[in-house]
Image (cartoon, rainbow, N blue to C red):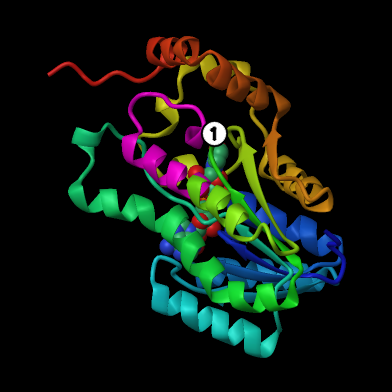
């Protein structure tokens, strides 16, 4: 996929992987549309990109709301045209055992990343199909391929996003639209773990064998995935080894996750 000159929609662009991707893609000549809820952060990022000579627009939107996603789609199509690249990086959600999770949070966990990606893709898909060119990349989580205790709702939502990505690829088989699932390891400088408390200390200790990466390294992985029309990409590569372990030896993976993972507090 050619990045220079492309119109690229990035959800979750106010922080972490989405923000770093916006900078890296604009450096390579993409015109970037930044989407997230926080207006001020998005405005500052767009201004920094423009000051560096890039083209960026901020569209504050709550993507868990289908009406807002619809309005965003209409405005972008009218004012900027059909996107070439969609990057779904919006995501939130604390890690909890099912019985610890407030009932309303079970719904919210699905809102972003799953429903937000589905709504945003749906508004642009007809125009992208007509253009018959483009790439849709979802920032998935290792939690959608490997499982560990104490993050039930989070994992279910990430499996939904991964399933969405695979189903979309099947739907688009006849077209020239590409679909990529991107799997980053733990990000050392993202706000994710400060915004979603009870999460970081639930990463199983076996995860320490996978080096942490920065948001920028994740963004560079996304750039490479786009440039090579990848179907799936893992960054760092050690994560891919764990993924293969879980596929080939599920009982070993389960055992490691249980023995090094979170436990319910004793009553
Ligand atoms: N951090 C990690 O170690 C890691 C590792 C693997 C996978 N991931 C996955 O990668 C994704 C991005 O993670 P990150 O580290 O970049 O997290 P982050 O820094 O917390 O960024 C999440 C982004 O999603 C946006 N967002 C949340 N709810 C939204 C909504 N309803 N509508 C629109 N935007 C919304 C947030 O912006 P606003 O608050 O401004 O809306 C923010 O820009 C997540 O799905 C996460 O599960 C993260």
Query: Depth check: 84 or 93 in front?
Result: 84
Is 152 located above or below residue 267 in the figure? below
Location of residue 25 by image quarter: bottom right
Q: Quadrant of the C terminus?
A: top left
Asked whether, in this view, residue 66 is left or right of residue 210, the answer is: left
Q: Furthest residue to the bottom?
A: 78
Q: Position of residue 255 (x, y in %)?
A: 42, 10
Q: Position of residue 61 (x, y in %)?
A: 48, 73
Q: Residue at x 41, y 26 (%)?
A: 201
Q: Furthest residue to the front?
A: 174
Beta carbon at label 1 within 8 Å of ligand 1 = yes
Q: Residue at x 45, y 67 (%)?
A: 63
Q: Is residue 153 magenta?
A: yes
Q: Position of residue 116 (x, y in %)?
A: 46, 62
Asked whether, in this view, residue 76 is left or right of residue 147, the answer is: right
What is the secondary structure assignment of the residue under circle 1?
Answer: helix
Location of residue 211 by image quarter: top right
In this view of the protein, can residue 230 be seen by the observer?
yes
Query: Depth check: 158 or 19 in front?
Result: 158
Label 1 neighbour load within 10 Å: few <14, some 14-19, many 20+: many
Q: Residue at x 43, y 47 (%)?
A: 160
Q: Residue at x 68, y 35 (%)?
A: 234
Q: Quadrant of the N terminus?
A: bottom right
Read off the residue under disc 1: 142
Q: Which residues are magenta?
A: 143-162
Name the main secondary structure of what is drawn in magenta: helix
């Amino acid at each position: 996929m050619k990045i220079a000159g492309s119109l690229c929609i990035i959800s979750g662009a106010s922080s972490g992987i989405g923000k770093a991707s916006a900078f890296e893609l604009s450096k390579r000549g993409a015109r970037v549309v930044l989407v997230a809820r926080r207006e001020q952060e998005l405005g500052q990022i767009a201004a920094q990109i423009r000051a560096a000579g890039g083209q960026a627009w901020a569209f504050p939107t709550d993507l868990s709301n289908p009406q807002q996603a619809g309005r965003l789609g209409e405005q972008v199509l009218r004012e900027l045209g059909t996107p070439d690249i969609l990057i779904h990086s919006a995501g939130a959600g604390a890690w909890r055992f099912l019985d610890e999770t407030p009932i309303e949070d079970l719904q919210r966990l699905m809102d972003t990343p799953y429903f937000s990606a589905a709504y945003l893709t749906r508004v642009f898909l007809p125009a992208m199909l007509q253009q018959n060119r483009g790439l849709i990349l979802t920032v998935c989580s290792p939690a959608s391929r490997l499982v560990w205790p104490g993050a039930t709702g989070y994992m279910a939502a990430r499996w939904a996003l991964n399933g969405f990505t695979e189903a979309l690829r099947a739907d688009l088989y006849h077209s020239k639209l590409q679909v990529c699932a991107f799997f980053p390891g733990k990000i050392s400088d993202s706000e994710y773990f400060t915004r979603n408390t009870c999460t970081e200390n639930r990463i199983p200790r076996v995860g320490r064998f996978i080096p942490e990466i920065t948001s920028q390294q994740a963004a560079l992985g996304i750039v490479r995935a786009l440039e090579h029309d990848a179907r799936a990409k893992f960054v760092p590569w050690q994560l891919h080894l764990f993924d293969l372990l879980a596929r080939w030896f599920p009982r070993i993976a389960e055992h490691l996750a249980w023995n090094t993972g979170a436990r319910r507090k004793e009553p």
